Amino acid sequence: MLLPKGGVTWKSAKARLPPWRAVLFLVTRTRFLVSLAITGLVVLLWRGISKSASEMQSFYCYGPSKSPMEMSINEMVEWTAHTQTPVFFNHHAAYEVNSSSIKTVDLNPIKSTSQAVSNSERVLILTPLRDASEHLVNYFDLLYKLTYPHNLIDLAFLVGDCSDDTLAVLTAELSRIQDQVDEKIAFRSATIVQKDFGADVEMNVEDRHSFAAQGPRRKAIGRARNYLLYSALKPDHSWVYWRDVDIFDSPDSIIEDFIAHDRDILVPNIWFHRYRDGVDVEGRFDYNSWIESDKGRRLRQTLDPDTVLAEGYKEYDTGRTYLVGMGDWRKNKDEEVELDGIGGVNILVKADVHRTGINFPAYAFENQAETEGFARMAKRAGYQVYGLPNYVVWHIDTDEKPGNLGGRKAY
């Protein structure tokens, strides 16, 4: 096609356009308007469908087409690999409790370790008392000499079924010790618990140590120990030291010596001084610390469950090995032996053993009661029960009648 000689001009272009009346006629025709409407509707629908498909893409389910409860660990990892878990930090202000009736006890920091002194671990000394006035002065003289820091020691006593002046003498002796100006002498605290159990076993030597009296007597002592324990044990105590009032002599460092062994339950050997013709026979006192024997196990199978065995008597030959028959105070005092029964003259216990519920049964537990039942119960719970055959604590001489063993050798 030939262009005009002068190029494209408005006049030449206008001449080629259709007449405006023809254009107006075209756009006003019904067919054209319907076509235009249909085209617009198609465009709008297409845009809506495209946008919905784009939005749905963000909700695409990754991973296997199964319930999350049915996925394996690997499938769960694949399913969540495309995203990260959202984390929201909501920092709360501290909650302040102003009620005086609400207290909190945190036992987590309370430990019983072999470094008790450096860790400032508190020791609770427990002593049950009955008609003990004649022994209290010597008891406190020995307590006064203990080298474990007195500011870390709490004292507690149970006074019950007394016919003498035990309570008055105890109070006087406590005042004598606690009123000392020297802070190294006075103890952190002292508690006196009064409880009568109606014990009807006379406290003379013959009756107290007869075989017939042992079952009721040991059960009564077990009750007294438990009342004292649960009245005095506090959350910050790490060790419980049971110490009888009639100890004649013991090393001043006994608490540190025992703690160094780091045993759950530990007892020494108990002897007594008895002089004959000016010679110390160094008698053996406590037959309640022993190692079980096959004969003892067979004997228990024949006994009524409520029968309480008492050691050192001819009525029952258990064949057990007694701690008093071992060792010598002149030998290595740190030598250990594992025991199945223990006596109550001197016991060091980790406080958590008692907190677990190991106490002194006032009934027949595996045919034992009180301290021997305590050892049985502790071993059933998986705790360690040990004795030191060469570490001797000296008891007063009780002048017991010989022959209880019926001619058998105790050691």
Image: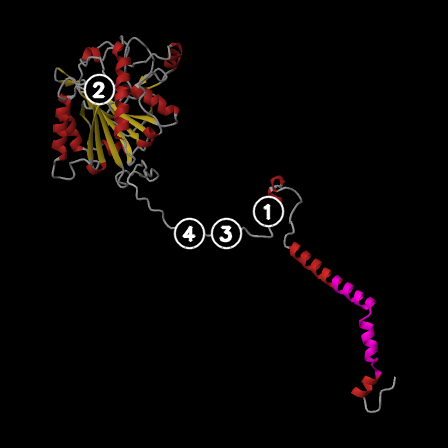
How far, Cα to Cα, is label 4 from label 3? 13 Å
Please tell me whether mark 4 or mark 1 is closer to you in this view. 4
Q: Is residue 264 visible?
A: no
Residue denoted by label 3: 87
Disc 3, SS: loop
Q: Which image quarter is the C terminus in?
A: top left
Mark 4 and mark 2 in contact? Answer it, CB < 8 Å.
no
Q: Which residues are magenta?
A: 16-41
Where is residue 363 drawn, in percent x and y?
32, 17
Which residue is painted at 62% across and 39% down in the image?
70
Disc 1, SS: helix
Mark with earlier residue (3, 1): 1
How far, Cα to Cα, is label 3 from label 1? 18 Å
29 magenta-colored: yes
Mark with earlier residue (4, 2): 4
How far, Cα to Cα, is label 2 from label 1? 69 Å
**The disc labelled 2 sits on which kind of residue?**
Asp
51 and 241: which is toward the camera: 51
**The disc labelled 4 sits on which kind of residue?**
His
Mark with earlier residue (2, 1): 1
